[in-house]
Amino acid sequence: MFHSRSFIAHAQKARKHHGADETAVAADLENQFTRQLSHLPAELTADLFSHCMGSREEFDARVQVLADILDLMYQQYDDEADPLTVADWEVLRETIDQYALDLDMSLVQYVMERVVSHHAL
């Protein structure tokens, strides 16, 4: 099962639970995102979460980009659907580069191959 599916399901439950309280929903999503990426440095997940929440206007779009980042970090990115923007790839390049020494080299290689293929150098 893709990690994105469980994250999206959690996001839908959080939205129902918290209703219109966007701050509570965002805190819930950040907690879930961080928990699902607990194998990565906390600062990296915080940086990615901040980018995703600020890069899209609509709630569903924010959740989807967070879910896509989760799949990428588990090396399960959907290359055919390719939902991330060039700006997303540029942030990923900078973030992965910043934390590369703290990451598994197979993950660094996986992400950077996709960064290059998206011309986000």
Image (cartoon, rainbow, N blue to C red):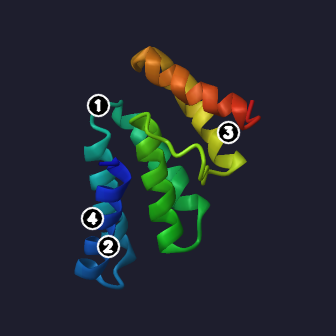
Q: Nearer the viewer, mark 1 or mark 2?
A: 2
Q: Nearer the viewer, residue 24 or 40?
A: 40
Task: Tell whether label 2 touches label 4 (CB within 8 Å).
Answer: yes
Q: Secondary structure at mark 4?
A: helix
Give the residue at x 34% y 58%. 5
Task: Tell whether label 3 touches label 2 (CB within 8 Å).
Answer: no
Q: Quadrant of residue 113?
A: top right
Q: Which mark is residue 10?
A: 4
Q: Position of residue 6 (x, y in %)?
A: 28, 57
Instruction: From the image, tell me which residue sits under label 1.
Output: 39
Instruction: From the image, tell me which residue sits under label 2.
Output: 12
Q: Earlier in the sequence, mark 1 or mark 3?
A: 1
Q: Nearer the viewer, residue 74 or 35?
A: 74
| Amino acid type for the residue under numbered disc 2 | Gln
| Amino acid type for the residue under numbered disc 4 | His
| Whole-number angstrom distance, CA of label 2 to CA of label 3 | 28 Å
**Label 3 Cα crowd, 10 Å radius (few <14 / some 14-19 / many 20+):** some
| Whole-number angstrom distance, CA of label 4 to CA of label 2 | 5 Å
Query: Is residue 98 visible from the viewing direction of this image?
Result: no
Q: Looking at the rendering, in which quadrant would you find the C terminus?
A: top right
Give the residue at x 37% y 53%. 4
Instruction: From the image, tell me which residue sits under label 3.
Output: 90
Q: Position of residue 14 (x, y in %)?
A: 27, 72
